[in-house]
Image (tube, coloured by chain):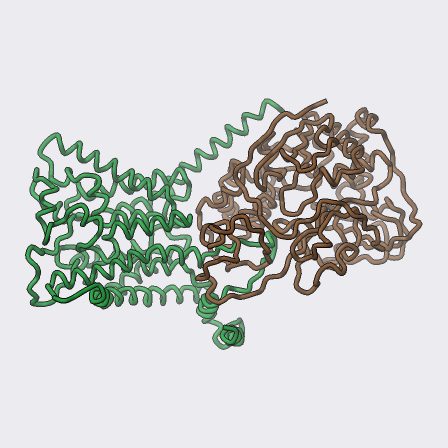
Amino acid sequence: MKFLLKLFEKQKSLFEPGGKLEKLYPLYEATDTFLFTPADETLQAPHMRDARDMKRTMVTVLIAMMPCVLFGIWRAGHQHNVVNQISNTGFIEDMIQGSLLVLPIIVVSYAVGGAWETLFAIVRKHEINEGFLVTGMLFPLTLPLTIPLWQVAVGISFGVVIGKEIFGGTGFNVLNPALTARAFVFFAAPKTMSGDGIWTSVVDNAQVIDGFTGATPLAVVAQSPDSANIIQTLQSADFGDGFTWMRLFLGDFGGSIGESSGPACLIGGAILIVSGVGSWRIMLSCVIGLAAGSFLMNAVGKSGDFIAFTQLPFHYHLVMGGFLFGAVFMATDPVSGSATNQGKWIYGFMIGLLAVLIRVANPAYPEGVMLAILFMNVMAPLIDHFVLKAHVKSRELYLRRFKPHV
Amino acid sequence: MRTNVGSYKIKHGLDLRLMGSPKPSIADAFNSRSVSIYPQEFEGIKPRLQVKQGDIVKRGGLLFFDKKNERLQFRAPAGGRVSSIKLGPRRAVTEIEIEVTSNEEVETFKRFTQEQILTLSRDEILAQLLETGYLAYIMQRPFSKIADPEVRPKSIFVNGMNTAPFQPDIHIAVAGDEEAFQAGLNTLTRLTNGSVNLCLAENPTRPSSAVMQANHVDIHTFSGPHPSGNASVHIHHIDPISPGDQVWVAGALDVIQIGKLFLEGVLPVTKVIAVGGNGIQESGRQYYRTRIGGRLGSLLDGKYVQESQRILSGDALSGIQIQADEHLRFYQSSITVIPVGRERSFLGWMLPGWNQFSTSKLFLSSWFRRSAFWNLNTNLNGSHRIMVLTGLYDQYLPMRIMVDYLVRAVLAHDTNEAVKLGILETDPEDFALCSYVCPSKMDIMGVIRSGLKEIEEEGL
């Protein structure tokens, strides 16, 4: 690798101030430090620094997302092959088919978003932030696989530019950029983002499998008549055994690309928690909030003629829709989430609670996790503000304890 | 007679497991033929020079005084000929070098016995400290500058435990100067109406009774990782600083120097310095009893490869870089030599990380090599990124301070908020570990330093 290093260092003068390509320095820097760890030294105390940097932190998040990505690809292909009744297919064929469906979306997201990111880095004369590696992957995972690619491009552009860069770039954004991008597409192109026909790839004129309607489990619940038995309704929907809890947990059903698998999300969550990159407080409090919300709804629904959705048990809420994915990867974004430890508990709890409320009480959209997280993103600074106020108060009390001594 | 009045367990922090710790035994090293004094070391002092090149000075002879307080005088650490006076930008004096003569003359000051010191008035003690410049060993908090003699501090803290890497252990360094240590403590007791708090490690490896059973002071013990040995942490737990308060702080090694001055009536010649770090050969890593202000070369020459090392006055976390041809600083009690790190590794972000040390869990070494000692260098191990509020820093500062928000308040020049969040209780050195672990490679010490400066200039 010595020759590659030499090659790069030789070109450096081109990109440095005064060089021909000086404007493209961020691009050079990003490639250079991607290939080789930087040679930068500490300029002042502390004269030594920990081995951890942002690159490694972000790459860890990316690794944590890999189970979701791989499962999403397999599921896309598997669903395609099962629903369209394509015979003689196995794991390999599922993966190939899934890659054809999913990879273009990921590629467009990275390419277009990356271009914006680079442009802003050049104009603002700072380095390209590794955070985009995560945003660029999170966004596609929240999309239905049938989305037109131009919408992916527009969506990620909105997420990066409006969701992040106009606030000043990474670290200054109020909302999670990937979710902002999704919300934009969700409201701007509702036809491609909600409904029954978009979650599974169906070949034109194909003989689809018996019972297949394309509805997601949340849509099935939302559409079931008042006072219906919700568990039975779920099990009689879709093909095969319907939406059993185990199937919902394992994730082999229609939904956004990366969100459906419980195990994949749990592996990702475990990686984030064990590595210390993601906040376990937020993840746990999201689940507690979801539990509180669903128990509350269950109790309210018992007392009269309420819509069937109120009867959905907690453990179904947990594995349906994008809850686990959102709690593990979206809510834990340190920039848009709550930063204080106490704040994280409130922030996560409210996300879980609001997710249930929006699911059950809002007739317009069956899924509420995205909106719950975005709403709490907006609230997070306020929560932290109150935590900080309490902290200042407790400091004053502590200092006052020593006053009589003077 | 005061005794042990409190013990504190510190949980947050980190002891870096570094290779190159100094052997705790004292060797003599007097062969420096020159000494220097660096006036810019004394924060807030405007020196008016009283010597010129070629002058012959006594040990203890006047070199310069403070324009703002002419009673505060700084004196030559050794007798001889002023061989050079170096000027920096705007003709500020940066260094006064003295060529030591073998038969130096010595300026004398008042001398007292240990018991007499206890009967001296505050003014008598301050007069001697001002006249010799040894007041500079006593720092005020907040703002870490030379104590203001007009102010009566609410208490005084003597730091007898420095938990930063490779710092001299007072229990060992005090050997031979036990009486001076007690005399130094005695002088401090006369400067405050409050208590003099001697803060010690809970379980010293080789306890010295002169330290463990020091008289006339309150002894507090602290256990736990660095920065449990930082004065700010001691103050925070024992007698915290509210806005408007002032406490004074002195290092235990410096208290010995003050004690020697009062017992002997002359400026002491030697002090104990710890030399450590993986940049210097093992034979060189130990404690030295050496000339105050002496040449670094007299301790280091032949014991390291000069080109690829960084030499620090102080420790690797909060020390200051100095050059090999310079002299020991007034406040210096250790030399740390660490290798320069400019190596670049291919696809470093992807490497499993067996050979890298991290406090995070992102490297194999953090799981499987927890008891290893590390050969760290000056590489930044990443590049500068924007700050992200994570609460990570709070795990490295054992005080009631939310570091993220304090840093943010300072960056926003919100001095009111910074004071409320506790900046006055701190010193930049307290944030060395926060900087060390920061994945965005922020200069948190620098941020806090500028914040304190801003508040000091604005006034409280």
Q: Nearer the viewer, residue A395 or A32?
A: A32
Which quarter of the rendering shows the N terminus of chain B?
A: top right
Q: Nearer the viewer, residue B90 or A67?
A: A67
Q: Which chain is green?
A: A
Residue B195: image quadrant is top right
Q: Is residue B188 left or right of residue A402?
A: right
- Count the marks: 0
- Tell me residue B76's x, y (percent): 84, 47
Residue A148, can we see it?
Answer: no
- Tell me residue A192's x, y (percent): 17, 60
Q: Is residue B251 left or right of residue A60?
A: right
Residue B53: image quadrant is bottom right
Q: Nearer the viewer, residue B416 or A158?
A: A158
Colour of chain B in the image: brown
Q: Nearer the viewer, residue B144 or A259?
A: A259
Residue B87: image quadrant is bottom right
- Tell me residue A282's x, y (percent): 35, 43
Image vertical order of residue A226 relative to residue B385, above or below: above
Q: Residue at x 50, y 48 (%)?
A: B412
Which quarter of the rendering shows the C terminus of chain B?
A: top right
- Tell me residue A400's x, y (percent): 54, 26
Residue B368, can we see it?
Answer: yes
Image vertical order of residue A108 relative to residue A381, above or below: below
